[in-house]
Every structure is written in C-alpha cells, then in structure tokens.
Amino acid sequence: MILVTGGLGFIGSHIALSLLAQGQQVIVVDNLANSSLQTLERLEFISGMYVPFIKIDIRNTPALNKVFEQNSITAVVHTASFKSLEESVLKPLEYYNDNVSCIMSLLRSMQRTGVRQLVHLSSLAVYGQSSTDLTEDIPFNYAYPNPYIKSQQMVEEIIRDTSLTDNEWKIAILRLSNIAGAFEHGVLGESVPPLPKNIVPLAMQVAALQRESIELRRQANTVDKTVERSFLHVLDGCDAVLQSLQWLSTQNFACEAFNIAGELISMQKLLDEIGEVAQITINTEDALYYPHAELDQIGAFSEKAKQTLNWQPQRSIRQMLEDEWRFYQNTLRGQ
C-alpha cells in the first residue's frame, strides 16, 4: 500500500489516481487546508473504488504513527507542502513550519515503523539560481533570499542526512517544473479558488470572463521582460513518480535527486498560448514593481531521469493547457 500525503491536492490527487490505475493500493492523508472532500468523491467515482482517506495534519506525529501502524504501508509519496514563492515572502513562518515540520514528522514516523521507501516532490526552484539548463550536480545557492526555496533546501538536506543513518533507505527526490494540466477527458484537475496563486488558474478565470485581466510583471532580464519557467503536464509528473517507485523497488539503498522538467516558456507567451486554446485574448496589466528577489529563468535538463528512471515528458504545453481548460469549463458547468 502506498501512502500519498497531500493526496487530495492538485498533484497528490492525480498521483493517487495514477497509482490506482496501475493496480496499486493507495491510502490518502490530507489536512484539507488547500483541498476538499469533493476531490475524494471524484477519485472514487473515476476509479470505481473505495479510496481510504484520513484527515490529519502530518505534522501531528502521533496521529501519523497510527496511520502507519494500522495500515500495511510499503512506500510514501510526499506531496504535502506550501509551494508559492511569492506567498512565502509574506508568510515565511508558515512556510518553514509547514514544509520543514512536515518532512521531519514524516521521516520520524517512517523510521519508527520501518517504512524506508520515499518519493519526495521538490521543485526546480530549489537551486536558487536563474538558469535555463540546471543539472543535478549544480550546487544550491543557499544565500538566495526566498523562504520557500530555503525551506525546500532544508527539506532536501534533512532527507539526505536521514538517509545516511540507515542503509535501507530508498529515496527519490523529484525536482519538478511548474505543474498544470488535468487528467484525461477533463474528469480530474486543479480546483481553482476565487483568488488563485498561480498564473494558469488566473488566466483561466480571464478566459472564462470571470476576471477582466491579469497583472503581469515586466522586469525580468529576458526577451519579453517576463520571467521564463519550465512547465510540465501533471500526468508527466505522475509518470515520473510511477517510474521512481519502480526504480526504487530494484535498489538496495538510494538517495537520488532528479530534475523532472518540461518546456521553458515566458509568462507572456504562456498567456498567448492560453488565449489561443480558449479563443480569447488574455488581457494583461503591468504589475507594480516587485521589490523582492525573483529568478528570471528556471529551466533544466532531465537527462539523469531519462537514463536512470526511463522517464521523459510526453505531453506538450499546448496539450497541458487544453486539458486544463477543458477541466475548468467542466467545473463551470457543474460537471
């Protein structure tokens, strides 16, 4: 049985569904801070199966211990974390408390119950460097002044230090691109709150005439002055998790990080692409000057994942946006 933390969130729910589709037994935990029980209903409807769910905050180690003790868990996919670079500047204590405390509690419970197989979802931003061609051997910039990035750097250090204490640990750290898209046929996707934190859901609201425009910063050292980010279809991310679990099952000991990267695109070009998909112009307004540090470009090579995990992205940015737009339209129709 595979435990998915944050399993009712956007990425976690897609991973859970992908695992179920592969015939795996899954148990989902979530504190419902950024998710809802409607996602659980969708998971069970789509899979036609009962999906065990426990509402807990995984920082509550005694409660998490009970989950491990009462279920035959063999591996964990850890997706539960706060992920916004901008929000972390405003709420640093929340980001350190959530991201760092979660991994410490999870590793303690795993250590206590003898579960040693873990796939941890990190981010390409963890390097703290602006680059289009990040590789896994590039050292972290620990001086980069962003609480989310610092918290993820801490998390990876905690994981590595813990793995050295026991030669039975089998861990894959996946440094992901920005994730978007939806499950096939628009049956599962990203639940969009009234005030989204990410650019794709914001643009979906503009495309659906729920918002007049989107604010766009134009202060990056790039061709069109907007930041460039690597984007990955959520199902390609799920495939990377499945391939990682399969690879880990063949290892005696492992603690390896992999870049899981998609296509690089500027925010302006991304909005243009969304406009083409939705057949509408995505209006923009120049945002106020942003005084905090911002990485102009985040792109990476995924050669290590290709060679070791036999993984590479299969879906384009256009398909990613088409799938997300289809799901968003379905939600507007109450489907």
Image (spheres, grey):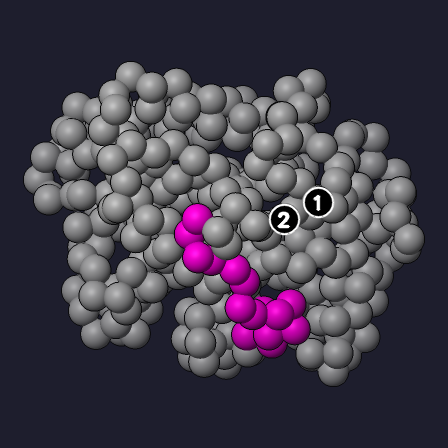
In the image, is residue 311 part of the stretch drawn in magenta? yes
Residue labelled with disc 2: 301
Name the residue type under label 1. Answer: Asp
Number of other residues with Cα within 10 Å of mark 1, as a class: few under 14, some 14 to 19, many 20 or more: few
- Residue 128 horizontal/vertical position (percent): 67, 30
Q: Residue at x 87, y 57 (%)?
A: 285
Numbered disc 1: secondary structure: strand
Q: What range is drawn magenta here? A: 308-324
Relative to residue 54, is residue 160 depicted above or below? above
Marks 2 and 1: in contact by CB < 8 Å? yes
> What is the secondary structure assignment of the residue under circle 2?
loop
The amino acid sitting under disc 2 is Phe
| Picture quarter with the C terminus | bottom left
**x and y percentages locating residue 99 in the rendered image:** 46, 30
Where residue 188 is drawn, which disc sits there?
none
Residue 217's place in the image compared with 206, above or below, is above
Location of residue 68 with respect to 260 vertically, above or below: above
Q: Is residue 192 left or right of residue 159?
A: right
Q: Residue at x 69, y 18 (%)?
A: 143
Residue 71 appears anywhere in the view: yes
Residue at 11% across, 43% down = 71
Q: Which residue is under mark 1?
A: 133
